[in-house]
Amino acid sequence: MIELYHGDCLDIMPVKIPDKSVDLILTDPPYNIGKAKWDKIPDYINWCGKWIKECERVLKDNGSFYFWHNDMAQIAQLMEWIRQNTKFVYNSFCIWDKGDFRALAWKNPSEDNNLRSWFSTCEYCLYYTFQDETGLTSVMGDYSNFESIKNYFKNEQQKINNETGAEIKSKVKWTTHFHSFAQGQSWGMCTEQNYRELQTKFAGYFLKPYKVLKQEYESLRQEYESLRQEYESLRYTHNLDTNHNNVWRSQERNNGKQHPTQKPLDLMERIVKTSSKEGGIILDPFMGSGSTGVACINTNRNFIGIEKDDKYFEIAKSRIEKAQQDVAPKV
């Protein structure tokens, strides 16, 4: 599914996009730094607030929201506005390190140069979700899940403390090996090696064979698996990739750039693949030259794009149509 709308996102989103219907919003709005006529916006922060509130409305509860920017003073204001006026929860501050991509002309500045600050060779991408923890956390934290096994560990711990007067934490890595599970804070059973370590350090305690515990755990795990999967589906998508950190470097260069703020396709595809599933619906309210749409086509996602500017709407439409042709089965 590809839906392209020519117009202002503040006019189109309220009438075309239903509540909680989008899996990922990835957009590159105007920065209000005077790049062009479209990049000079009065009352900028409040204007951003209007489209951000629309993004909040249309995004699913387990969705993700990314937007690009490069002006730190305005970023600070936007982050505070979002904190005070939306349900979005800050997740990450990602940096596109352009490296030599922009710095080449500044390696040997002339004596007449009047630069009085550090030359910027990066841009920023802010990442928000609606969750600071997940539904799965609630399941893991429910003491009634695996209660019989958790009670066994807690009772043995209490017997050691009462009978020896020694805190079990001082003699074994209780927190690392067992405490989280015993306190209802994790879902995974301890390993046999860790259990044997506990038996060795505390002779006369933890006498139940590990095999018996493991069988009991597996039986209960199957019983709770449907519940775990239900809560797992409520989590926002985040697929790990190699070198997974918040400093990004593109392998692309400025070839074929059709918009002054066009982002590298490999970075856009990386965000799409990390924060959505195949077949998901991705929205870009400021489509520009259509890079988000091309990234969606290349990664088998659905796309909704909105662009106000006549010229860039046609460029985006053309790029997206070409991308569709490139991935279409050859007959």
Image: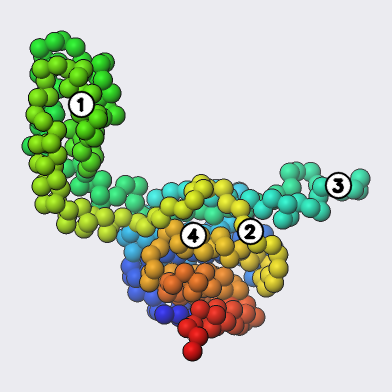
The residues tagged by marks 3 and 2 sit, at their Cα atoms, a distance apart of: 25 Å
- Extreme bottom residue here? 331
Looking at the rendered structure, the kind of residue marked 4 is Ile
Whole-percent x, y for residue 330 in the image: 50, 85
Mark closest to the chain's N terminus, 2 or 1: 1
- Tag 4: Cα neighbours inside 10 Å, few (<14), some, or many (≥20)? some
User: At 62% from the left edge and 57% from the top edge, which residue is drawn?
Assistant: 250
The residues tagged by marks 3 and 1 sit, at their Cα atoms, a distance apart of: 65 Å
Q: Mark 4 or mark 2, which is nearer to you? A: 2
Whole-percent x, y for residue 97 in the image: 63, 50
Circle number at residue 72:
none
Q: Is residue 279 above or below residue 6?
A: above
Q: Mark 3 or mark 1, which is nearer to you? A: 1
- Tag 3: Cα neighbours inside 10 Å, few (<14), some, or many (≥20)? few
The residues tagged by marks 2 and 1 sit, at their Cα atoms, a distance apart of: 49 Å
Label 3 sits on residue: 108
Label 4 sits on residue: 271
- Tag 1: Cα neighbours inside 10 Å, few (<14), some, or many (≥20)? some
Residues under numbered marks 3 and 2 in contact, where contact means CB atoms less than 8 Å apart: no
User: At 47% from the left edge and 63% from the top edge, which residue is drawn?
Assistant: 272
Left or right: 253 as drawn, with respect to 77? right
Mark closest to the chain's N terminus, 4 or 3: 3
Mark closest to the chain's N terminus, 3 or 1: 3
